[in-house]
Amino acid sequence: MALAPDVTSSGDPHAGEGQGTHIDAPELRLFVMGLFFIFGGITSLNDVIMPKLKELFTLSFFEVSLVQVWFFIAYAIVGIPGSRLVKRIGYMRGAVAGLVTMIAGCLLFIPASQTAVFGVFLFAYFILASGVVLVQVVANPLISLLGPAATTHSRLTFAQAFNSLGTTLFPYFGSILILGSLAAVTADQLSGVELDAYRTAESQAIVHGYLGIAAALAVVAAVVWMFRNRLQGERHEASSLSDGIALLKRPRFGYGALCIFLYVGAEVAIGSFLVNYLAQAHVLNLSDAEAGKLLAFYWGGALVGRFIGSGLLRVVSPGLLLATVAAGAITLIAISANSTGTTAGYSLLAVGLMNSIMFPTIFSLACEKLGPRAADGSGIINVAIAGGAVIPALYGLLADNVGLGMALVLPALCYAVIAGFGYYARRPAV
């Protein structure tokens, strides 16, 4: 494996432009693809678990959205410190630190189930998400370095397809394991000791699922640790928190960071409540388990779209393509909110296809021409992913007051801002 001498932790598509500074390591691409698969699948599993916790703890839509709040707030808290940690210990050791933290989060579901306290579940999600953030801080800039600058948009989109593979498979099998074995009684029919016992018993499916994930993560962490010294010559520029925040003054980067916040928020908000949305009598009238399996179409649409998009981005302006798919998402949301039955259900599921290229394209467009400061840009982008904590909570609050359908106006507004960014960034940065 050859490593160019001036490699930095840049997430910039054009970092070192004209200098040939990229990592020549085909086998390392497989490792990064695996990381995208892991953190994508774990993140989307929240969509299956939320209906379960809503029933177990008799929560409102806003209250159950706290799962996403605690999960995605980790990006705001851990994003920049995580970036600095990776700079200090390197990509491979940073990935191991993230994987070990994820394992700790998975194991915390054991005391969460035994205590039958919703707050302990939320803490477990925060620790799990902190590990996901560390892994993502490694994966996004590293994939940008695994090839020439000219194909970064396409390469990052292709890598995100493996993220989508995880988000497609995890909810499908998770719905079978977690939602497919609901008891004959419900939490609102019980109280006292019986209620605690019910919550403990019914949450065992969640515990078993995360214990399996923890075992798989341990194997991956061990393999990565064996190759911790493979990136000899890896270099990272020192920087301060103010250096990263100062990047927000650049219109293109600041606008892009806002769009990451809105995109993740919109995608997570829709996915978080899809099971409840599809289960409504005027939509598909399904059980939670049946609706949970259909999440595979939402996330699977993003999977298919990313493979298609990785090709289109080689011949079409990334900005214009971003504006087009954002407009498509708004159209599909409008159709779903104003119809019933299969039209309402499957048009909302199809928003996943529109989501496909958004994250990698916004990320690479925002970070264009940041040069040696792109590592700081990657840290700020990871903080912006905290939109997954804010937008779903607002959506849940709206849904409690005006219904799940009318609340779709919120993600639609998010996509409108993203469409504007696509048009704004239709030309290469200067």
Image (cartoon, rainbow, N blue to C red):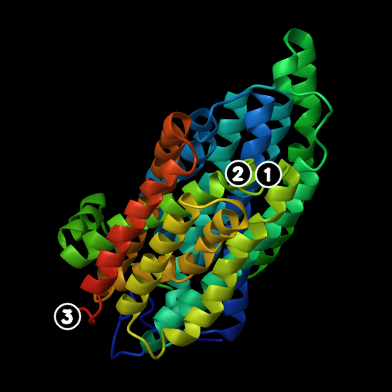
Please give the label number shown on residue 224: none
Q: What residue type is labelled 2?
A: His
Circles 1 and 3, Cβ within 8 Å, touching? The answer is no
Mark found first going from the N terminus, 3 or 2: 2
Disc 3 is placed on an element classified as: loop
Disc 2 is placed on an element classified as: loop
Q: Which amino acid does label 1 sit on?
A: Asn
Q: How many marks?
A: 3
* Residue at 48%, 47% in the rendered image: 269
What residue is disc 1 on?
285
- Using the image, determine if residue 331 lies above or below residue 212: below
Give coordinates of residue 384: x percent, y percent.
35, 52
What residue is disc 3 on?
430
Please give the label number shown on residue 282: 2
Determine the image quadrant of residue 416: bottom left
Q: Which amino acid does label 3 sit on?
A: Val
Circles 2 and 1, Cβ within 8 Å, touching? The answer is yes
Q: Which of 242 and 36 is in front in this view?
A: 36
Q: How far apart are marks 1 and 3 (CA)?
A: 52 Å
Mark found first going from the N terminus, 1 or 3: 1
Disc 1 is placed on an element classified as: loop
